[in-house]
Amino acid sequence: MRVVIQRVNHAQVNIDGKTVGKIGKGFMLLVGIKNGDELPVVKKAADKIAKMRIFEDENGKTNLSLKDVGGEILSVSQFTLLANTKKGNRPSFVEAMRPPKSKELWEDFNKELEQDGFHVETGEFGADMQVSLENDGPFTIVLDL
């Protein structure tokens, strides 16, 4: 599993000109599920993200978690995160898990975050989406499990 975590001031996902997910301060998550991933990996990723301390405290140190700052989550499934670009110029996506299992695990991931008390907005699995955001920092982390 690979998740790109971006600390944002705001983010949203549009499909065909309609906003389907929108948050204020929080995390924009681009989520890639790979072959072999199972529920324990999804739970571990959600737990790690829930506890990640990348917001600044009163001293300017990154000591605060998403929960500490009352942040939200926008989660977007993105199989292209698992592209293999080692050979040639055309990426290979053979490491990305195929639907419907990948969709199920992405939904499980989002449910885990909701159970941790976060407001979670999402894109639409498999849709052509337009994602916009204002990265705060910029602060971007790649989580590989």
Image (cartoon, rainbow, N blue to C red):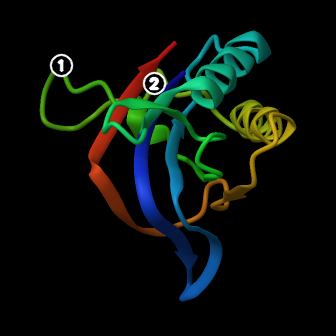
The amino acid on which the numbered mark 1 sits, given as a three-letter code, is Lys
Q: Nearer the viewer, residue 69 or 105?
A: 69
Residue 5: x, y in percent?
44, 38
Residue located 40% across and 35% down the image: 81
Q: Residue furthest front?
A: 59
The residue identified by callout 1 is 86
User: How many residues crowd around disc 1 within 10 Å: few (fewer than 14), some, or many (20 or more)?
Assistant: few
Q: Residue at x 66, y 40 (%)?
A: 67
137 with respect to 105 (left or right): left
Q: Secondary structure at mark 1?
A: loop
Residue that numbered label 2 is attached to: 94
Residue 49 visible, this angle = yes
Q: Is residue 129 visible?
A: no
x%, y% of residue 17? 54, 89
Amino acid type of the residue tagged 2 in the rendering = Val
Q: Quadrant of residue 31?
A: top right
- Find residue 37 and report its horizontal and vertical position in percent: 65, 15
